[in-house]
Image: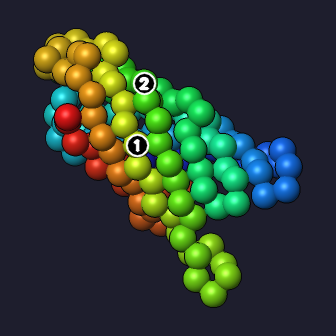
């Protein structure tokens, strides 16, 4: 999935080196349960402590003329990549379960998946999803 952050908030400090933020994105799928060009929206709440992020909650929905699919995050982590004491990127991974699936995606209902993500530019990133 090729994603762009949409309305993601800035990290909100809750202590020394500790913050949380709500991230929202829209994505276009390349393949997957609904086929290419399906559109997905997702929301994730992240907690960050000294450069290490953990998903507190997350969900999303994919739509296409072929059907619809919804998922829930089971968890995930994010690591800020540093170079010379400055952040230069990030990498993330996690897992989830498809909680609703219709049409072409119907066989995926109840299946779990693993994902990895990395940035591709300002406010953009790619997510690779593998069915378990």
Q: Position of residue 111 (x, y in %)?
A: 23, 23
Q: Position of residue 59 (x, y in %)?
A: 47, 27
Residue under label 2: 72
Q: Tag 2 or tag 1, which sits nearer the N-term?
A: 2
Left of 67 or right of it: where is 2? right
Q: Residue 65 versus residue 69: which sits nearer the camera?
A: 69
Above or below residue 3? Residue 124 is: below
Residue under label 1: 94
**Label 1: few (<14), some (14–19) or many (≥20) C-alpha neighbours in 10 Å:** some
| Quadrant in which the C terminus is drawn | top left
Q: Does residue 57 appear in this view?
A: yes
Image quadrant of residue 73?
A: top left
C-alpha span from label 1 to label 2:
11 Å
Q: Position of residue 43 (x, y in %)?
A: 54, 32
Left of 51 or right of it: where is 12? right
Mark 1 or 2: the one toward you: 1
Q: Residue 16 versus residue 38: which sits nearer the camera?
A: 16
- Label 2's element? strand
Above or below residue 93? Residue 71 is: above
> What residue lies at 54% left-to-right and 71% top-to-bottom?
81
Q: Which mark is residue 107?
A: none
Above or below residue 88? Residue 3 is: above
**Label 2: few (<14), some (14–19) or many (≥20) C-alpha neighbours in 10 Å:** many
Question: In the image as oriented, which residue stretches furthest toward the bottom?
Answer: 84
């Amino acid at each position: 999935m090729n994603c762009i952050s949409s309305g993601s908030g800035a990290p909100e400090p809750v202590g020394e080196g500790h913050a949380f933020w709500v991230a929202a994105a829209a994505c276009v799928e390349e393949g997957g349960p609904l086929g290419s060009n399906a559109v997905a929206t997702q929301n994730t709440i992240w907690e960050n402590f000294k450069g290490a992020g953990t998903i507190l909650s997350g969900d999303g929905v994919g739509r296409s003329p072929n059907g619809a699919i919804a998922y829930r995050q089971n968890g995930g982590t994010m690591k800020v990549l540093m170079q010379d004491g400055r952040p230069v990127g990030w990498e993330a991974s996690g897992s989830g379960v498809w909680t609703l699936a219709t049409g072409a995606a119907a066989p995926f209902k109840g299946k779990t998946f693993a994902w990895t993500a990395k940035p591709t530019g300002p406010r953009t990133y790619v997510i690779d999803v593998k069915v378990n």
